């Protein structure tokens, strides 16, 4: 299916996945208000625009008050949940700040908001502290399940280790988080076999939630430079990455029908209706960006000029307002 170029067959795949979502999860789509708290990161992933080595990136951190205002906005708009995302940082001061923010967000509406974290790899103790403070879901993509490809898209040092990332995902699961993972689609050097293995990996690891999205090049990154100079590092066109991403969502829905699958924001960098297309292909979660608009232009993981005026039209979609929208799959495990 990943290699199929037949429009009718591909259309049937999307439809079958969307029908399966409807029968397994129901008609609703759940929202997560995304708060991008800071673009300061200690890592240097070769594809990412906010990597520590990018001196052209202007750095920011939201204040506690700004973050709490975003969370209150999510509560009053009945989003049900927030995602706190940012660059990877460690240290006691950072850990404690997040802990205190979690406790304060939990006070809003008497614990009304579900909280997902996405703050990279942390020690088991830190994950546990944040879980006890009220976070109950955590997003950490494996990026690619192929260790060789993983090595090609990350610097070769102890901060960027495939085994450590697997270990972090295991820690999250054993602590009791709903652990979400996922991959980038259409990376340099990546082929259909890699993507097929990714799907089997995500199924075998039994993740209750998945966020997969297209690779979107960023001008000021080593991976973009490699792709320009090394013919073996070419990657699919915008249209092909869009199609591959939608196929991946549909195939995963068929492989594991009852998980939460996000319509990733990066899709919208490729097509203005990218996320709606994902919802029509089996996805059931959307993460509207609720970061104060003045800061959005600095959180450039990828080139997202098209996204700065994000105007998500979910007109055709039935939303589960005020609900956490936890993974049915997790509740069964
Ligand atoms: N620092 C945390 C969370 C922020 S990055 C972490 O890495 O987990 C969130 C996700 O953005 C990453 O997992 C990666 O899959 C995605 N990302 C980064 N650069 C990207 C790019 N150029 N194209 C598409 N997705 C990208
Ligand atoms: Fe940092 Fe995440 Fe970007 Fe890697 S992908 S450089 S960890 S923000």
Image: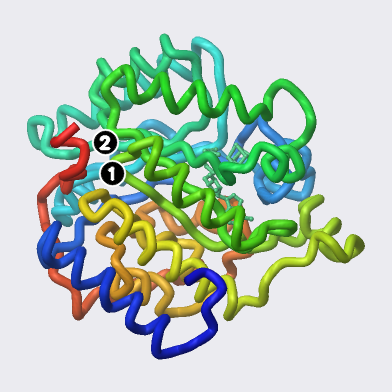
Colouring style = rainbow
Pointer 1 residue: 82
Please report whichever mark, 1 or 2, sits nearer to the chain's N-terminal start.
1
Q: In which quarter of the image is ligand 2?
A: top right
Vertical relation: 209 (above or below) 163: below
Q: Is residue 76 above or below residue 330?
A: below
- As displayed, is residue 73 above or below residue 86? below
10 Å neighbourhood of mark 1: few (<14), some, or many (≥20)? many
Residue beneath the point at 85% across and 58% down = 225
Please name whichever residue, 33 or 3, is drawn nearer the observer in this view of the structure.
3
**Does residue 93 appear in the picture of this structure?**
yes
From the viewer's perspective, is residue 205 above or below residue 122?
A: below
View extreme (right): residue: 229
Please tell me whether mark 2 sits on a helix, a strand or a loop.
Answer: strand
Marks 1 and 2 in Cβ contact (< 8 Å): yes
Q: Which residue corresponds to the image point at 27% horizontal and 51% vertical from the top-left?
A: 260
Q: Name the residue under label 2.
A: 115
Nearer to us in this view, 7 or 166: 7
Question: Percent x, y for residue 104?
Answer: 24, 26
Element at label 1: strand
**Which residue is depicted at the point 67% across and 41% down?**
150
Residue 87 point in image, percent of width and height: 56, 36
Mark 1 to mark 2 CA distance (whole Å): 5 Å
């Amino acid at each position: 299916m990943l290699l199929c170029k037949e429009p009718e067959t591909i259309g049937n795949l999307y439809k079958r996945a969307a029908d399966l979502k409807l029968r397994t999860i129901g008609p609703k789509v759940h929202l997560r208000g995304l708060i991008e708290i800071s673009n300061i990161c200690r890592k240097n992933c070769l594809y990412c625009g906010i990597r520590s080595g990018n001196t052209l990136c202007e750095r920011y951190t939201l204040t506690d008050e700004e973050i709490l205002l975003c969370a209150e906005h999510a509560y009053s708009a009945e989003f049900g949940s927030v995602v706190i995302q940012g660059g990877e940082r460690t240290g006691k001061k950072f850990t404690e700040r997040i802990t205190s923010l979690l406790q304060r967000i939990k006070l809003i509406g008497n614990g009304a908001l579900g909280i997902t974290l996405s703050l990279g790899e942390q020690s088991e103790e830190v994950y546990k502290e944040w879980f006890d403070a009220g976070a109950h879901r955590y997003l950490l993509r494996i990026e690619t399940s192929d260790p060789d490809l993983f090595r090609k898209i990350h610097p070769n040092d102890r901060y960027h280790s495939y085994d450590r990332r697997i270990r972090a995902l295991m820690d999250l699961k054993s602590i009791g988080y709903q652990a979400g993972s996922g991959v980038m689609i259409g990376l340099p050097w990546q082929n259909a076999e890699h993507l097929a293995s990714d799907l089997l990996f995500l199924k075998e690891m039994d993740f209750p939630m998945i966020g997969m999205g297209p690779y979107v090049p960023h001008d000021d990154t080593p991976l973009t430079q490699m792709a320009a100079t090394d013919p073996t590092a070419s990657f699919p066109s915008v249209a092909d990455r869009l199609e591959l991403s939608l196929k991946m969502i549909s195939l995963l829905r068929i492989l594991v029908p009852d998980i939460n699958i996000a319509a990733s924001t990066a899709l919208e960098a490729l097509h203005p209706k990218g996320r709606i297309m994902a919802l029509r292909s089996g996805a059931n979660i959307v993460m509207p960006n609720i970061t104060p608009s003045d800061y959005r232009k600095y959180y450039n993981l990828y080139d997202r000029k098209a996204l700065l005026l994000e105007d998500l039209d979910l007109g055709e979609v039935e939303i589960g307002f005020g609900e956490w929208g936890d993974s049915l799959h997790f509740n069964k495990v």
